[in-house]
Amino acid sequence: MPLNVELAEIRDFLAGHVPFDSLPATVLESVPPRLSIGYHRRGSVVLARGSAPVELLVVRSGAVELREPGGELVERGAAGTCVGGAALASGTPQAVTVRAIEDTLVLACPADLFHQLREQHAEFSAFFEHRAGMLRDAVARQREHVSGADRSVLSGTVRDLVTRGPVSIRADASVLDAARLMSAERISSVLVTEGEALVGIMTDRDLRTRVLAASVDPAGPVSAVMTPDPATTHPDAPALEALLELVRRNIHHLPVVEDERPVGMVTATDLLRLQQANPVFLVGDIAKAPDVATVADLATRLQRVVAGLVRQGTSAHDAGRVVSTVGDAIEQRVIALTEAGLGPPPVPYAWLTLGSRARFEQALAPDQDHALVLHDDYVPDLHASYFAELAEQVTNALETVGYPRCRGDKMATNPHWRQPLGTWHRHVARWVGTPTPEAILEASVFFDLRHQYGDPGLTAALVAHQRRAAQATPIFLAHLAAAAASHHTPLGFFRGLVVDRSGEHRDTLDVKRGGINTIVEIARLHGLACGSSATSTLARLEDAVAAGRVSPTLAADLRDAWEFLGHLRLRHQVEQVRAGRPADNWVDPSALSDFEKRHLKAAFGVIRSAQGAIAQRYPVRELT
C-alpha cells in the first residue's frame, strides 16, 4: 500500500540524506511509519552527554550543535544530521552534548529498527562507526577496484619476495670457497656469518673490484673483502621499503634478517621481475644521465609511474615516498652535474631539500624548496661567487626538468637561504626567540628539511640545533599552534563543503591548503614539542602519541584523514595528467560520489577537532 502524503515526504527527505540514502527503496519505504516526531525549543538540550540514547534522532528542520565537555564546538548540523547513532551503535554513553540552536524538529528512529537496519545494511552501519574507522574504510573503498592481478608487489611485504632460504658462508672461509659456493648455487652474492649472526655480504662486484682487480689472494678469508654490516630489511617490512632502500643506497642486494639471523635475500632483479613498472628503472637511469636535458626527458616518466601506483591501489603514503625518491634522484644528479662543471667547492657545503619532499610526501606538480648550508670556513669575498653560481645553475636546471621556482623564493638562489652553519643557528634562534608571523612562516618551511647532497655532518648539526631550540621555547610552539589552529578548512557552518566562488578555481576546493597542509602543521608542532627527530607527518604523529602529547584516537583520526585526502589528491592529479591538463590540488566536489563527499567532510571534521585540541593544549589565546 502506498504511503500517505506526509509519510512519503519523510521517505523522500530521508532518501536525500546519509546514511538513509544507502538503503534500498523497499526498505526505505518501510521506515517512516516506524518513526515519531519530537520538538526542541532553541537553547534546549536534545541529547545530554553521558545519557544512554534509546533512539536515533534525525534533524528534520532547524539546527543543532555538538559540544565537548569543556565547551569546545565539535560540529553544527542542519536538516539531515543524525544524533546519538554512534553511542546507540556501540552501547556506550553519549560522548557530547547536543543542543538546539534553532527551534528544531527531529525524527526519532527506535533502537530496534536502528539495529535491524545496521545488521542488514553494511553501508548504513558503517556510517555510525568511529570516524577513524570510517575514513580507513573510505581509503580501502578508494582502492578496492584494483584487481589481484593489477596489484603491485609494492603492496605486499618483504616475506612475499623471498623465494629461497639464505645462502651463507663463515667469515673465516676463503674467498675461493665463497666464489665456488656462489657458482654452484647460481647466485650473485653470498651472506657472511659468524655463528648465526650476519656480519657481511660478498657480491660479484666485490669479487671483481676487491679480489681480481686488486690482485688479492683468493685463499684469504672472505672477511677481508666482504662488505661489513650491510643494510638489511625485516621479512615483515613493506616491499616498497625494500625497493626504496635499494634505490637510495644504489645497491642490488638486501639481506632479510629476523632476530639477527639471515632468512633470505631481496635483489633488484626480484623486484624488477615482479613489478616491471616500478621506479627502480627510472632512478637508475637518472643516476647515469650525462646531462640535464637527459634528466628532463627521464623526469617525464614520473607521471606514468604515479599513474601506475594509483591504478595498483598504492597508498598515498607509499606513493609519496616513491615520488620523493625520484625527486631526490633528479636533484642529486643535477647537483652532481653542476658541481662537475664548476669544479670542487672551495669549502664543504650541504644542499638541503625542504617541504613535502623532505617529508617524503611529494605529489605531482611540486615547486622547488631548497637551501644551502656552508661550512663556517666560508669567506664571502672568496667563496660567494662559487655558491651563488651553483645555486643558480641547479635551480635553472630543476626548472628545466619541470620543477618551477618557489613563488615565496625559499630557494638557495636567495642569499638569505644560502648561509654558513653559524648564521643558520642565529636564524633559528631568531625564529624561535622572536616568532613574528614572518619568522613562523620561514620556520614552517625550514623545520621540514632533509640532507640531499654534500657534507651530511653540516645537516646533522643544524637539525640537532633546531630540535633543541624548538623544544626549549614554549612561546615558539604556542605561535606554531596559533598558526595551525587559524587555518580554515573548507567546511561550512552546517558541515557543507565550501568552494571558491570566483576566479580560475571557481566551484573547487584546495585539498592541500585546506586539509593536508593543516595536518602537516599539526604533526610538525607536536613533533617539535616532543623533540622528535622524525620529518614525515605520520612518524611525527607516532612520536607525539608515544610522548603523550596526542591521544592515540586523535592521531589515528589524523592519519586516516591525511591518507584519504592524499589519495584523493593523487587520483585527481593523475586524471588531470591523463586529460592533458597541468596537475594541481583543486578538487571539484560535484565530481565526487556521495560516498566520497561524505568522507571528505569527515576528514575536514577531524582536522577541525585537532585544531580545537591544540588550541586547548598550547596557550594560543594568550598570544592574541
Image (spheres, grey):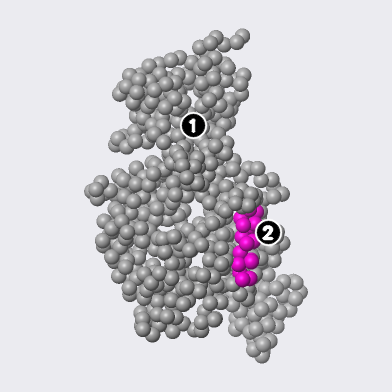
Q: Mark 1 falls on what kind of element?
A: loop
Q: Position of residue 492 (x, y in %)?
A: 41, 36
Q: Where on the picture, by quarter, is residue 475? A: bottom left
Residue positioned 36% across, 69% down in the render: 416
Asked if residue 310 lies left or right of residue 49, the reply is right
Q: Position of residue 562 (x, y in %)?
A: 48, 48
Residue positioned 37% across, 27% down in the render: 64
- What amino acid type is highlighted by mark number 1? Phe
Q: Name the residue under label 1.
A: 128
Asked if residue 293 lies left or right of residue 164, the reply is left
Marks 2 and 1 close (CB-CB < 8 Å):
no
Residue 296 is a magenta residue: yes
Q: Position of residue 480 (x, y in %)?
A: 33, 54
Residue 244 vertical position relative to residue 47 in the rendered view, above or below:
below
Q: How far apart are marks 2 and 1 (CA)?
A: 39 Å
Earlier in the chain: of badge 2 and badge 1, it is: 1
Q: Name the residue under label 2.
A: 277
Q: Which image quarter is the N terminus in? A: top right
Q: Where is residue 428 in the image (x, y as percent from the top left)?
A: 32, 66
Q: Where on the picture, by quarter, is residue 274? A: bottom right
Foreground: disc 2 or disc 1: 2
Rendered image: mark on residue 114 = none
Magenta residues, as a range? Answer: 293-308
Q: Mark 2 falls on what kind of element?
A: loop
Would you call the spot at circle 2 few (<14 residues within 10 Å), some (14-19), or many (20 or more)? some
Residue 537 is a magenta residue: no
Residue 58 vertical position relative to residue 208 in the rendered view, above or below:
above
